[in-house]
Amino acid sequence: MFDFAHPILLYMLLAVPAFFGLYLMARAARRRKLRRFGKAEVISHLMPEVSRYKPAIKITVQLLALAAIIIVIARPRAGEAKQETTTAGIEIMVAFDVSNSMLASGNDDPGGTSRLDRARLLLEKLIDKLSDDKVGLIVFAGEAKTQLPLTTDFYSAKMYLSELSPAMITAQGTSIAEALKMSMNAFSSDDKVHKAIILITDSEDHEGEAVETAKLAAENGIQINVIGLGSAKGAPIPVYGKPGEYMRDASGALVTTTLNEALAQQIAKAGKGIYVNGAASSALSSLQDQLNTLQKSEFARINYTAGAEQFPVFAWIALILLIIDIIIVERKISWLQNINFFSK
């Protein structure tokens, strides 16, 4: 299979016939100017060093070099293939809280790193450890939506992390139960594959039913682990998109948000998983150990091997053509002038 990494750049090849057209126009204009001085057969004797064929050869070499350079920057590739392998792992759905409260500081310092940024970092490190598993992403606030279905493409999964923000969900609040229900429905129907939900939140549940939903998940063989973010002391909530401003209630008092660690622990217990505080240095290792308690099951994994880059071939062609263009001069070759190839 042969394709290009940047096929849209191939439109630049239209410049080749355009330049050739300009060349023909320039040669026609040259002939018209020479005819002002007399007949071409007579004038040619006054310009003995001028070659009739060299300009055409040079423009041909130059345009071929230009075409090769355009192909180089379009990055031709060959040999891309789809491969299916069998690996052993589990299915993991990450339920990521993007409510406004996640913009608050993750520790007792109001100006500290936000819970959202800390959660992004934790999730990125977690994904790096899930080499043979499938992972999906649910974002939630007052409602939930699927951001990334289950996949083994961890590179794509990590690309979504920079986009996580409260702006993704118009209905603000925190509905943990809805996020857990959507995560449960996002798993495959294969009962042989073990499943786990990782809930990343500050546990400010505004809708309720989170513990009951966690129990339902456990009854269906789905383990729920919770990563809690924030502090018990509380922190003000920045207004999204307005640096330096903080949320206030109807009376003008500053709104603060605290980590509801008790609820987070209840959800984890009901879901037969563990609770870890996101600020703890052992958070990821503890979570990884818990996930390893789930037996890994075999499932198909599809890999796409990147096509072998072919641009060096065209780069060499362009270089050779440019060297030839430098060597070729428009005057006649002196040692060929005395040879008549068409004499009887």
Image (spheres, rainbow, N blue to C red):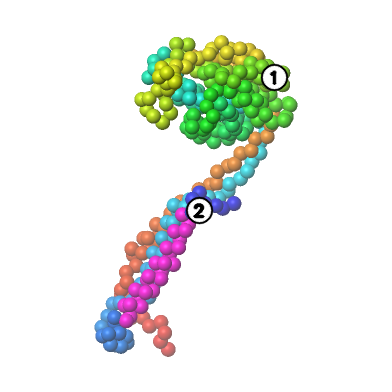
In primary-sequence order, the first of circles 2 and 1 is: 2
Residue type marked 2: Pro
Which residue is found at the position 56% from the left and 10% from the top?
262
Name the residue tied to disc 1. 216
- Viewer-proximal residue among 196 and 337: 196
Residue drawn at x 72%, y 21% as measured from the top left: 220
Check disc 1 and give the amino acid type. Answer: Leu
The image's mark for residue 333 is: none
Residue 330, image x, y percentages? 32, 72
Secondary structure found at label 2: helix
Nearer to us of marks 2 and 1 is 1
Q: CA distance from mark 2 to mark 1?
A: 50 Å
Question: Pointer 2: what residue?
Answer: 7
Q: Is residue 306 left or right of residue 28?
A: right
Q: Where does the image place residue 281, in percent across and percent down from the top left?
A: 48, 15
Characterize the magenta stretch by its predominant secondary structure. helix
> In the rendering, at what x and y percent does residue 38 appear?
28, 87
Q: Which residues are magenta?
A: 9-32
In the rendering, at what x and y percent does residue 163 appear?
Answer: 49, 33
